[in-house]
Amino acid sequence: MESGQLNSFECFTDIAARADFNMSASGESPAPCWHDASRAPIVGAPPAPLSLLMRSFVAARTHDLSLLAGSRGPPPSNDPCFTLQSDTTSVWVQGCEYGDNSKCRSGCSGQGVCLFGACYCRPGAEGADCSAVATRALHGCEHSSSDPSKDYCLAHHDYGVAVVPAARWRTAQAAESRLWTQSRHSSRSPNASRTGRTRGDRASMHVSQFGSFKALPPGSLGRVVELGCGPWTQSYFLLEARPDITAESITLVDPGIEGYLRSGHATYANGTLRGIPAVLLPIPAEQMPTGRPFDTVVMINVVEHTFNAFATLHTAYRLLRPGGIFVFQERVIRLSAAPQIYHPIRLLRQFFDGFLSAGYMEMFRFRGLTSEVRRKRHTHGITAEVYYIGHKKGSDSVGESSLPRGGKFRVQAD
């Protein structure tokens, strides 16, 4: 990052801070911040009215950010367990622990992370405490490469790819940014005709696979947070599919929010989402502050876009109150499938199954082959999709016995 420029979280707080102020009569925009995905000033369509942008950021700073952060605030900017790292080794050797009272045998021997009481070993290590050398140990691998063809270096045969280096994540984010600014993708508006242009990011497909969200009770979802909201959000389509459901407020989290607002395609550009007050936090899910819990957490097709899946799932769990509702979807891509520039994170179904069954009580789960799997099984290596709605269990700690431990299970051939 060049001197004087700000990262996503600093950019957000800096803009918000300057919005309390006396804005000049000319209404000039603050100096542009760098967007983490491309390390370049956000460009594109003319920005939304400055007052609108400022109002969104001020609302985030003065309302929900303080409530979310409580006394904890965002993770420390130098904490490798929650921040983007140039080399993934710094995550594994740190002995990162995710989840309250999350203790693992021997601290995973400095060769893995502890996720709710279970060790997940770095590539090249295995065993319940990660002390053994994997029989499939990788040789000559780099852990800081931006090259998608080297993604196999980041994979562990027990669970998949969970942590990626900064260069690789930025490569994926820049590719996504280019994809969604193409005309055929940028037209994916919620207002597009159902029989004409595609609505949102596979939104209609998600609604269908979730059974039109019929498992959700009518009434208010309370305080909602959507992680990885994108420009259109999935909450928009959830609320559209269930007009008998509303919410007290919706907090939207995505490091690209500023760019979405400037592009003119964001569904929340007026500070609301289907008439519900929206609070905007342009930060990565991994760095979301925790404090006052939410009543509902929505996370649809997000994990594969993150840089640390352990931190992201930990955050989603910690943000939700006991008994709250978790709406979750993710794709499962075969580890042996060809590299894909957009999605370096690849977690196996066993991993998701263990995490969900340990932390939540099932309300809904789609069982069977989705249309996405049928269409892309051979071309993209997608073997399954997880569509899940559940209540968070009453304790703030996930029962470790339900989670698959490193070295305790093996991937079925597919």
Image (cartoon, helix red, strand yellow):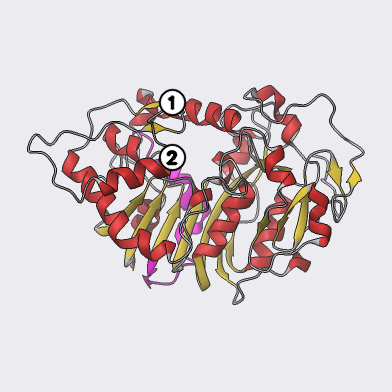
Residue 242 in view (yes/no): no
228 inside magenta stretch: no
Q: Is residue 215 above or below residue 145?
A: below
Amino acid type, mark 2: Asp
Pick whichever of labels 1 and 2 is earlier in the sequence.
1
State which region is magenta. 196-223
| Number of numbered discs on residues | 2
> Residue at point 56% right, 62% down?
317
Residue at mark 1: 2
Q: Position of residue 123 (x, y in %)?
A: 79, 39
The C terminus - image quarter: top right
| Residue 24: quarter of image | top left
Looking at this view, name the residue that lies furthest to the left.
25
Q: Position of residue 373 (x, y in %)?
A: 63, 40
Q: Is residue 316 above or below residue 155?
A: below
Element type at marker 2?
A: loop
Q: Position of residue 355 (x, y in %)?
A: 68, 59
Amino acid type, mark 1: Glu
Residue at mark 2: 201
> Residue at point 59% right, 77% down?
394
> Residue at point 78% right, 55% down?
119
